[in-house]
């Protein structure tokens, strides 16, 4: 079984999203694991805004879908 590097997935997703008009102000996506079943991604924007996204129990691809859904 391949272990997914969820922070690396977030870093690469930021690079792709920054190329769009809609998310050009996205500065970073920070993955945090707060225990066995509590995982979040915090989106930081150049404007100073933040958004916390619940990604608990997500695979890497499910995490990407949850991030995109939360940012839409």
Image (cartoon, rainbow, N blue to C red):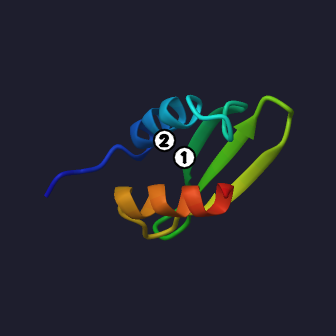
Residue under pointer 1: 31
Question: In the image, 10: left or right of 24?
Answer: left
Examine the rendering and report whether any part of residue 34 can be seen.
Answer: no
Report the residue at 41% width, 64% height from top: 62
Question: In the image, 7: left or right of 3?
Answer: right
Pair 2/1: label in front: 2
Distance between the alpha carbons at the discs numbered 2 and 1: 7 Å
Report the residue at 71% width, 56% height from top: 52
| x and y, in percent, of residue 21 in the image | 66, 34
Residue under pointer 2: 10
Q: In the figure, 2 relative to 19: above or below?
A: below
The label on residue 45 is none
Q: Residue furthest front?
A: 21
| x and y, in percent, of residue 12 in the image | 43, 34
Quadrant of res 39: bottom right
Q: In the figure, 18 relative to 35: above or below?
A: above
Report the residue at 56% width, 56% height from top: 68
């Amino acid at each position: 079984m391949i272990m997914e590097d969820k922070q690396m997935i977030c870093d690469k997703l930021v690079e792709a999203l920054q190329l769009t008009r809609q998310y050009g102000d996205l500065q970073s996506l920070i993955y945090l694991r707060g225990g066995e079943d509590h995982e979040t991604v915090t989106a930081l924007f150049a404007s100073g805004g933040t958004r916390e996204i619940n990604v608990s129990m997500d695979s890497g691809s499910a995490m990407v879908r949850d991030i995109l859904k939360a940012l839409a």
